[in-house]
Image (cartoon, coloured by chain):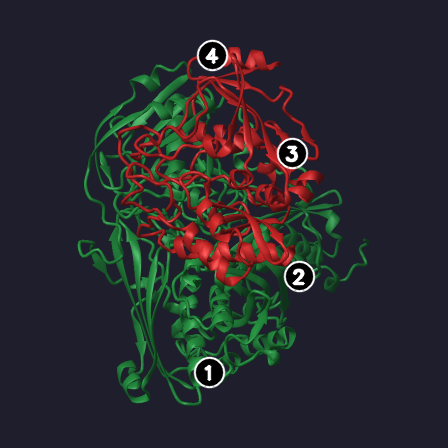
Chain colours: A red, B green
Amino acid sequence: MQAFELLTARKTDDALALIAQYEGAAFIAGGTTVVDLMKCGVTLPPVLIDINGLPFGEIDANEERIRIGALVRNSDVAYDRNVVHRLPMLSKAFLSGASGQLRNMATVGGNLLQRTRCPYFRDPASRCNKREPGTGCDAFEGIHRGHAILGTSNHCIATHPSDAAVALIALDAVVELAAPGGTRRVPIEEFYIVPGATPSIENVLLKGELITAVEIPLGAAQRNATYLKVRDRASYEFALVAVAAGLEFDGGTITQARLALGGVGAIPWRVRGAEQVLAGKKAGPQAFKEAAEAALEGAIPRRDNAFKVELAKRAVVRALETVVRER
Amino acid sequence: MTATVTRESIVGTPVDRVDGGLKVTGQAQYAADTPVEHAAFAVLVSSTIARGRILAIETEAAVAIPGVLKIFTHENAPRFKQPDPDWMNALVPSQTFMPLQSPEIIHYGQQVAVVVAETFETARAAAALVEVAYEVKPPLLLLHDPAAPRFQPDVFFGEPMQDARGDVDAALADAGGRIDATYTTPIESHNAMEPHATIAQWNGHRLIVHEPSQWMIGTRNYLAKVFDLAPEDVHVISPFVGGGFGAKGFSLPHSVFAAMAARAIGRPVKLMLSRAQVFTTTGHRAQTEQHLRIGASDDGQLTAIDHASTISSSYAGWFIEPPGLTTMFLYACPNVRIRHEAATLNLPAPCPMRAPGEAPGMFALESALDELAAQLEIDPIDLRIRNDAQTDPKTKLPFSSRHLVECLEAGADWFKWDRRPKKPRQMRDGDELVGWGVATATYAGLRGPASARVRKEDDRYIVEVATHDLGTGMYTIMTQVAAEALGVPISQVECRIGDSRFPPAPVAGGSQSTASVMPAVQAACLKLRESGGEMAEADAAPGDEQGRYSFQSFGAQFAEVRVDEAIGRVRVSRFLGVFDCGKILNPKTARSQMLGGIVFGIGQALFEEAVVDPRTGRLLTDSMAEYRVPVNADVGELEILFVEEPDYVLNPLGARGVGEIGITGVAAAIANAIYHAIGKRLRDLPITPEKLL
């Protein structure tokens, strides 16, 4: 870890001006990712801009949508009454992430920007195309049990670690971004970028832009929903496989499905093909199995993470069964 | 309390930890917390390769940071000779290799530089700027690498590691080998909550060292030898230890580096290891592969056991994990053979970790017995009772006190074992299959020589012993024993430990502190009480009973697991440990030790694995996030019962230690319960989700 300067932004305009002013500066909110990576030597920002004083700490709900400020702590989202009742998948996803202490610090905006737990990314002595473009990928032939099987490339097989983002992508959330020129709204599905040949580029956030909120539309498939996380231990653990699932019914027939996978994707992985498989079908084992097959279509497993294909299929079925059971 | 308190009402009662208040209010001062005036800070730089040599170390950028005082590398560090392990003289380095003496690299994380600066932050920043160029050689990392030197270790603390009785091959052929299976356990890390740290301070030719230690006398003797000092000129202080589990017992190189730096700059130096450095430079439990063959009669009488272990070893170390030792004596079996083979690899030096030998070895043996019970359709408890031995099958000496059968029976009763279906896959609850498993637990009842001093100051009694409290409760039980012997309430007794100048005690390893130290404390206090004087000292040592009996603790451990087969999830919903450890001096602290051992065992069974990149030797699990120990949510309902049969042959208190036995049967009990739940035998630890699919 290297010495750095900590500046405090009191207003959004100040934050945007400061980030533009200092080369290599980074925002800090909860700090649960950025400080960790500074300790590993993965990122060495000379200046940190504290944005905790900015006015993005509220959750606001109406009949159509829930809007969550980027600075709301993960715990506060998880226990918010509106989120619990109307977006149970999101509440469960937040509660399944990290530990109680981390959730009390970590913010929604920061959660979207979490970096991968790939051990080679976190070790500056290892080769990593995400950390240092063009150096190669030590995970490819190394240990990659936790790595992604969907959305990967020959340059990077790192897994996106967020749980909340998986739920948000299933929920069609919109990310609100502020820049000196004004704000823009990006559907979260367009926010993340698969690694391709440039794994260091993880999202569409421009230099100097700041996440200010996420907005989630409400509906039946958002309410009849769950988040299932399979992991090596019961808490403080990243997903081996996670499933965000939501269904809307007409009697026993599925009219709309929302399905996304975590722990297996290079980015939070929406599986629209599987959603289409479910739409119009009778909720039951046959449809769920077909959806699971469709969800894992195109998976590229490697030596250590081949089990994730079967595990993810089973988790999809279980999550859908759970939604039906808890309907 | 009043002076009318009787003996019986203090020892053996659940007295609260006397140091508990200090700990929960943050006032207990651990080594790195010690305020030292004008201290400088040292940070280690670690090798990023596992084998090769340093071609060049570039320190210019680091030295240029204001506040950097000195950087030591192999080029400028003083020459130190690493002493050989010498038990007779209480001097045991954890490794045979002394870093910073040559450009040679033999394991990942090896110390290659020590940066000393005015502040910790400066030292850490400068350490990150030290650039090391290496010539990399392909490291030897795999247990079966044909290029790795292999050897057959002779003894483990006097116990033969290649040993046999009867004719195993003939018996296996005659009775028909029933079980022929291989069990594997990975490298595991102690991961005590408190990272290692050393504060070194020179006062002329005298060296004062604050560090968390399981063996201050050992560290004192080690540093005296390395720096060519008289042992009395080294003063090691260690009042509180935030867990050790074996990794703070033998002497480690960073203690030398702190003293080296302090002497060079003429100031006290505080050296703290990062969590990652704790993983790579303070020891680990070796990887094991164990091949077990068992012969038995149709009614379950054991006729032969062959236990062959292959162990990972290190170019840096000497300690060899001994999984087979327990097999020589645990059950009455006429034909037993144990073998150990070690492979020398480019891994850091291994060291003892809570129940070295037993923890991996009993996973294999007690799993194999469960397999035998299933094959013969005998209840696994009955199988163990049928093969109980009241005379030690290895030494032919009687056990001073062996109550394994009582433990098994009491546990069966509590667990309602008679309701257990004989076949697997019989208990379902929703998405989960439920299974029950059992395993024997055991650990040696060691006792060593110890001394104690007690002084009267007004109406208070100060008791001093150079022993250790690793969070175990030593302060508390010492206070109880002293108060009882003195005939005063515990409020009048103050125990002082953790100082090498106090009367000597053994290493806080081998679960021996209680059995060794308490007789000395009791003797000194009785002496003072009888003499009516101001001060008394006493030595207490084991006697000729050691040649007439075998001393061993026993237990029975029961697991209930719930397995969600579809998604590979196991939960340990209930766990019971029943233990025979002689007289329990404090049921509260003893219970806590057992709970800790069981949680440790749950980690071993389901989570813990140090993952090394097989190409580079890099440790990929060098943080608390990546190296998984159980969290609270992983631990179900735990219960502890003691079969309290005092062992007065071992010592006048009748107590044996409780530090290690708690883990010994856990992994097998869990694996056996998983088998009972789903009918699948898992022989490779840890049992992670993909193995259950």
Q: Position of residue B143 (x, y in %)?
A: 27, 57
On the same chain, marks 1 and 2? The answer is yes
Q: CA distance from mark 3 to mark 1?
A: 69 Å
- Chain under numbered label 3: A
Tell me the element at label 1: loop
Tell me the element at label 2: helix
- Chain under numbered label 2: B
Neighbour class for label 3 at 10 Å: few (<14), some, many (≥20)?
Answer: some
- Three-letter amino acid code of the residue under disc 2: Pro
Q: Nearer the viewer, mark 4 or mark 1?
A: 4
State the mark number for residue A20: 4
**Residue placed under numbered mark 2 in the picture:** B587
Neighbour class for label 4 at 10 Å: few (<14), some, many (≥20)?
Answer: some
Q: Is residue A156 left or right of residue B237?
A: left
- Three-letter amino acid code of the residue under disc 3: Arg
- Chain under numbered label 4: A
- Chain under numbered label 1: B
Q: Is residue B205 visible?
A: yes
For the residues labelled 3 and 1, say whether their Cβ atoms are less than 8 Å apart.
no
Q: CA distance from mark 4 to mark 2?
A: 63 Å
On the same chain, marks 3 and 1? The answer is no
Q: CA distance from mark 4 to mark 1?
A: 76 Å
Q: Position of residue B530 (x, y in %)?
A: 69, 58
Neighbour class for label 2 at 10 Å: few (<14), some, many (≥20)?
Answer: some
**Residue placed under numbered mark 1 in the picture:** B387
Q: CA distance from mark 4 to mark 3?
A: 32 Å
Q: Nearer the viewer, residue A86 or B311?
A: A86
Q: Is residue A108 above or below residue B40?
A: below
**Residue placed under numbered mark 3 in the picture:** A65
